[in-house]
Amino acid sequence: MSIIEFKNVSKNYNGHPAVKNFSMKINAGERIVILGPSGCGKTTVLRLLAGFISPNSGEIIIDNQIVAAEGKIIKEPEKRNLGMVFQDLALWPHLSVKGNLEFGLKAKGIKKIEREKFIPEMLKLMQMGKFINAKPAELSGGQQQRVALARALILHPEILLMDEPLSSLDQDLNEQLRKEILKLHDKIGFALLYVTHDREEALDIGSRIIVMKNGEIEHQAKLNIQ
Ligand code: ADP
Ligand code: MG
């Protein structure tokens, strides 16, 4: 059964469609990649799902509940159980790695004794244990991405949204982190909605690929290789 559904969703900016009549379903644990060139509407789809913007028409459904429809946000972003690793959602520079991970846990009302347990566990899983007290500026690009991933996954989201998370990394690191994302997916079992303009990345990460062009779905492919 699907956990996410877009039903004929359209979003316009200044009268120009960024996303047109977009429909998709995502099942629990699935790995979906949206592939398409710059400007085709990929980030807009993620922002719609996150609840940062509302659709002009159509409906967005999460766990059988309409969360946005016809220009209205019905469920606020913080009430949707989504994890996000976006290009423009950087780490908080004034907080340590621990502080960055602690923020969401505190907001969820997780007690200190549990936070002190969960944070080192998650950092260990990401091979970032020894950087717990580092500030983001002291970390490399790849390490910062690992912290951003840890910060999202520690909240146990039902689905993780990733917007071209590896595009600024060099090829070796890019491939290494792809493998780690797949490993984490197997281990933790979230659904993944991953956006990229890179075909090879899409084939590597997705169990299903949605190809977008000019705001519309051009093509969908289910891959047998899991
Ligand atoms: P992608 O992520 O695939 O590069 P986007 O979803 O960011 O594409 O953008 C899709 C289209 O919508 C583009 O033409 C872009 O210029 C336009 N767009 C995106 N965000 C805004 C905005 N906040 N205001 C106006 N136009 C926007
Ligand atoms: Mg984008």
Image: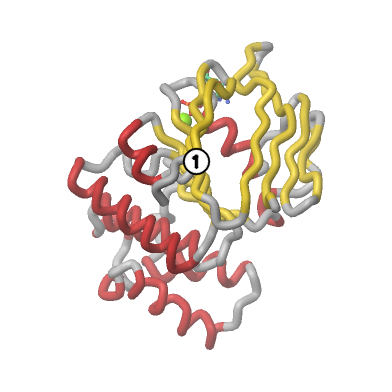
Residue 88 visible, this angle? no
Residue matched to label 1: 208
Give the x, y percent position of residue 18.
Answer: 60, 20
Q: Residue 198: percent from the left, percent from the top?
A: 34, 32
Numbered label tally: 1
Position above or below: 53 against 175: above
> Which residue corresponds to the image point at 29% horizontal and 69% vertical from the top-left?
128
| Residue 165 in sight here | yes
Q: Is residue 84 above or below residue 14?
A: below
Instruction: Indicate whether 210 appears above or below 172.
Output: above
Give me the residue at 49% from left, 41% from top: 208
Mark 1 C-beta to ligand 1 under 8 Å: no
- Please tell me whether residue 87 is drawn above or below residue 160 in the rendered image: above
- Looking at numbered disc 1 in the image, what kind of residue is underneath it? Arg
Question: Pointer 1: residues within 10 angstroms few (<14), some, or many (20+)?
Answer: many
Q: Position of residue 121 (x, y in %)?
A: 40, 78
Query: Residue 212, how many percent across, how many down?
Result: 51, 24
* 222 or 171: nearer the viewer: 222
Dot 1: element: strand
Q: Is residue 144 left or right of residue 68?
A: left
**Residue plotted at (57% across, 38% down):** 46
Residue plotted at (61% across, 56% down): 28
> What sort of colour scheme is used for the picture?
secondary structure
Q: Nearer the viewer, residue 46 or 95?
A: 46
Between 55 and 25, the residue placed more toward the observer is: 25
From this viewpoint, which residue is outermost toward the bottom? 113
Residue sitting farthest toward the top = 15
